[in-house]
Amino acid sequence: MRWTRAAGRSLLALVVLVTGCIASGAKADGRGTSGRGPITLATAGDLTGYLGPLLQGWNRTHPGERVTLVELPDSADETHAQMITDLQGGDRSRFDILNIDVNWTSEFAAAGWIRPLSRDRFPLKSFLPRVVDTATYDNRLYAVPYVTNAGLLLYRKDVLDKEGLPPPRTWAELEHDAKAVAPKYKLGGYAGQFLPYEGLTVNTAEAVYSAGGSFLGDEGQRVTVDSAATREGIDFLVRGVREGWIPKAALSYKEEESRKAFQNGHLLFLRNWPYAYVAASSPGSPVAGKVGAVPLPGPDGPGTSVLGGSNLAVNTHAQHPDSAARLITYLTSEPVQRQVLTQGALPPVRASLYSDPDLVRRFPYLPTLRTSILTAAPRPKSPRYEQVSLVVQAIMHDALTGQTSPAAAVRRLARELAAVSAR
């Protein structure tokens, strides 16, 4: 995934044009004094190494507004903790821009750590519609979508083709194939990320949303989890473990463990992010050429994925907020978003890239991913999201391991989420 020198020169010319137009009409956003100057971007560890070279394009054309990249730990939990330590501590202006997980926006906004932004300043109408909602809190824009994501159902195309079966569109079809087809090929049926961590919250939310349920409303002020739909979603996963078509080993899976199990030929179906499709389809993979991807199934048809990705926010105490906003506009411009996909293998937020013929040839899952994103939903919005997620993880783990029933799990969720919301 390397650009030619000619393409690189074209990209640089576009960047100069885009950022020059931005500069002509730049205005201050939010609170504090507007200003331009050097800026710092904080992000979780860049596993593909694409971001440093990308930022060099900005630095070459903005010598007075050079950006310094600070990579925090790879773990989302550790990055979250370190950002909060800095934002609450004595060096609150250390970072100008924060690359935050989409589900942190409400928390950071409610705490006053990031500043509201002008919608007119950013190309929001060019983004996939669903992603903008992850960057808002209390009907105000507090961040700008940078990359997005949605869960997909990966499947062994070769196995289903031999059986004359299409990929499943409903839970009943998934369950049937996982129970009846997978054992014939000595495969596990279905897996997701069921270790008690953030991935379990995501998998639980997708099952609940697909059944028509929810957890919270009114930005986390109202608990909505106690419903028949929520019980149906939780029961789907609990039943899978109890009946064996979800292998017990999946209770220890995070993204990478589940990806390796599928890629090494041990599973018929896997819920994961698009990167797992890329890895499983790459040369040298034991299942290369045998993998398909479709939207997650639901009770009666396609289900609902949870939105992943990250948003770019400006620190309330940023020393140069105008330069920070200008860099965000640069990072979300179409030529740079194209590079985010081709160099970083990260799903872009620009809608036009999902139908670009050249990109679709290189990344054939893009149309499916676009469909999943357009019907996806954010994780429960709450200024206390971390506590909400911990509650969901703990209770769902007890349900999956048979320590509590789906009905009892829903009642407990209602009580404990109400306690979190009241704090």
Image (spheres, rainbow, N blue to C red):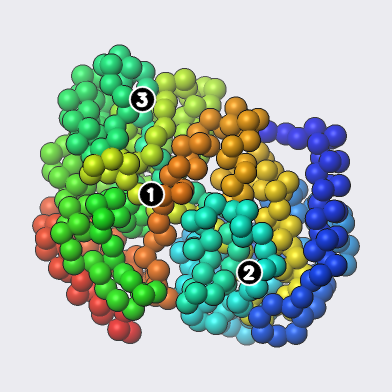
| Amino acid found under the numbered disc labelled 1 | Ser
Q: In the figure, is residue 250 to the left or right of 379?
A: left
The Cα atoms of the two marked residues, 2 and 3, are separated by 43 Å
Image depth: mark 2 or mark 3 in front:
2
Q: Residue at x 40, y 69 (%)?
A: 381
In the rendered structure, which disc, 2 or 1, sits on the residue that comes first in sequence?
2
> Which residue, given by chain and number where applicable, does mark 1 sit on?
305
Determine the image quadrant of residue 240: top left
Q: Residue at x 63, y 35 (%)?
A: 356
The Cα atoms of the two marked residues, 2 and 1, are separated by 26 Å
The image position of residue 378, as x and y in percent, is 42, 59
Q: Secondary structure at mark 3?
A: strand
> Which residue, given by chain and number where applicable, does mark 3 sit on?
156
In the rendered structure, which disc, 3 or 1, sits on the residue that comes first in sequence?
3
The image position of residue 33, as x and y in percent, is 75, 85
> Which residue, given by chain and number where applicable, does mark 2 sit on?
119
Circles 2 and 1, Cβ within 8 Å, touching? The answer is no
Residues 258 and 179: in front is 179
Residues 14 and 73: in front is 14
Determine the image quadrant of residue 90: bottom right
Q: Residue at x 42, y 25 (%)?
A: 291
Q: Residue at x 66, y 84 (%)?
A: 31
- Quadrant including the N terminus: top right
Q: Secondary structure at mark 2?
A: helix
Total count of labels: 3
| Amino acid found under the numbered disc labelled 2 | Arg
